[in-house]
Amino acid sequence: MSQVEIHYRRPPDRLDVFTQELVLDRPDLKVTLHERPPVSNPVRVGGRVIFEPGASIVWFVFPDRWYDMDGPVPSPR
């Protein structure tokens, strides 16, 4: 697999760059895998854990669009 850099912009002027494995490369869709991102605490939304330290993330990136979709991959226990 080849690696890509995802440049993720957040308001007001924050830029994060993530190096990930390119899993699928189509003109309309890029699927990447971010293995073990640097997260030290569980991420919670509405009291539910949506991301645990050590889990990987699959990103679905749509070129020339202002959004992406991502989801955690559960870590083995």
Image: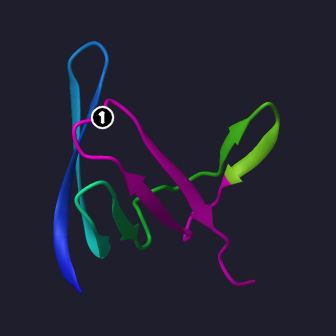
Task: Point out residue 24 in the picture as x, y percentages from the top left corner.
Answer: 33, 74
Q: How many circles with numbers are drawn on the protein?
A: 1
At 39% from the left edge and 34% from the top edge, which residue is drawn? 67
- In the displayed structure, would residue 43 be above or below residue 28? above
The region drawn magenta spans 51-77
Element carrying mark 1: loop
Query: Residue at horizontal 42%, vertical 56%?
Result: 60
Q: Residues within 10 Å of mark 1 (few under 14, many from 20)?
A: few
Q: Residue furthest front?
A: 27
| Type of the residue with mark 1 | Arg
Question: Which residue sits furthest top?
Answer: 12
Residue at the spot 57% in from the left edge and 69% down from the top edge = 55
Q: Which x, y percent locates residue 58?
A: 48, 64
Q: Which residue shows up at 24% across the image and 87% down it?
A: 1
Position of residue 44 measured from the top left corner of the image (x, y, whole percent):
70, 40
The quarter of the picture where residue 7 lies is: top left
Taking the view exactly as shown, the residue that stands out farthest to the right is 47
Q: Is residue 25 above or below residue 66?
A: below
Q: How is the image coloured?
A: rainbow
In the depicted structure, whether residue 49 falls above or below residue 29: above
Magenta span contains residue 74 = yes
Is 64 included in the stretch rendered in magenta? Answer: yes
Horizontal side of residue 66 vs 73, given as left or right: left
Q: Quadrant of the C terminus?
A: bottom right
Location of mark 1 (residue): 65
